[in-house]
Image: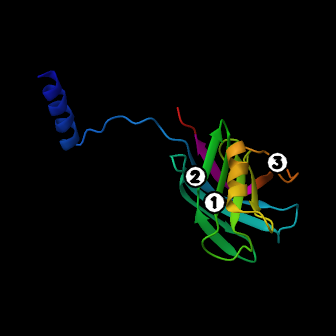
Amino acid sequence: MRRASALAVIMVMALSGIALAKAPVAMVTGTYTYLIGDDPGRWRTVTLNARATDPAMGTWSWTTPARNTSGPVTCLRVDGADAWLAGPVTSGDLGSPAVFLWIHDGGSPGTNGDTAFTWGADPGETLADMEALCESMTTSPYGSDPFALVSGNLVIHRSR
């Protein structure tokens, strides 16, 4: 009888729109621009909207003076104020099959402490290589420090 009562309560909750609580999922959102060095002609604009579900869900886009590329997020790892992402290139021509991103959320506004590093896979590197960097939460895989944002904001929503 108890089982039937519990089932009835769950059915009433579901039918009345009361959702069972789910644990919050880590997310990364934002659009931001940074410069390579001090050259205003070498800007990068990135848009991220991703959730650290299993598997990761979301999208990324990367715009430079020469091209627009985008794709899905297939890896997202969050640790405190840092996040690592990877995904294949499915739109545009980056000249590589995948990207790796490392971002740091320094608070709002984004130009006051946020940093970002975006890497298109080198020849011979694969999506699996970029996902391995993401999974290992590598902070500087190519000897480059992240760049300070010149506009925009990125936000890392940490899971609890």
In-image side of 119 versus 15 (left or right): right
Identify whether 122 is placed above or below 52.
Answer: below
Where is the N terminus found, in terms of image quarters?
top left
In depth, the one of 92 and 36 nearer the eye is 92
- Whole-angstrom CA distance, mark 3 to mark 2, is 21 Å
In depth, the one of 92 and 129 nearer the eye is 129
| Residue receiving disc 3 | 140
Indicate which disc, 3 or 2, sits on the residue closer to the N terminus. Answer: 2
The residue depicted at 52 percent of the width and 50 percent of the height is: 55
Identify whether 53 is placed above or below 124.
Answer: above
Prevailing secondary structure class for the magenta stretch in the rendered image: strand
The kind of residue tagged 3 is Ser
What SS does tag 2 mark?
strand
Identify whether 26 is placed above or below 153.
Answer: above
In the drawing, what numbered circle is on residue 29?
2
Indicate which disc, 3 or 1, sits on the residue closer to the N terminus. Answer: 1
| Residue receiving disc 1 | 87
Local crowd size for mark 2, using a 10 Å CA cut-off: few (<14), some (14–19), many (≥20): some
User: Is 154 in the magenta?
Assistant: yes
Mark nearer the viewer, 3 or 2: 3
In depth, the one of 44 and 72 nearer the eye is 72
- Whole-angstrom CA distance, mark 1 to mark 2, is 15 Å
- Kindly give the residue lying farthest to the top in the view shown: 2
The kind of residue tagged 1 is Gly
The residue depicted at 69 percent of the width and 64 percent of the height is: 98
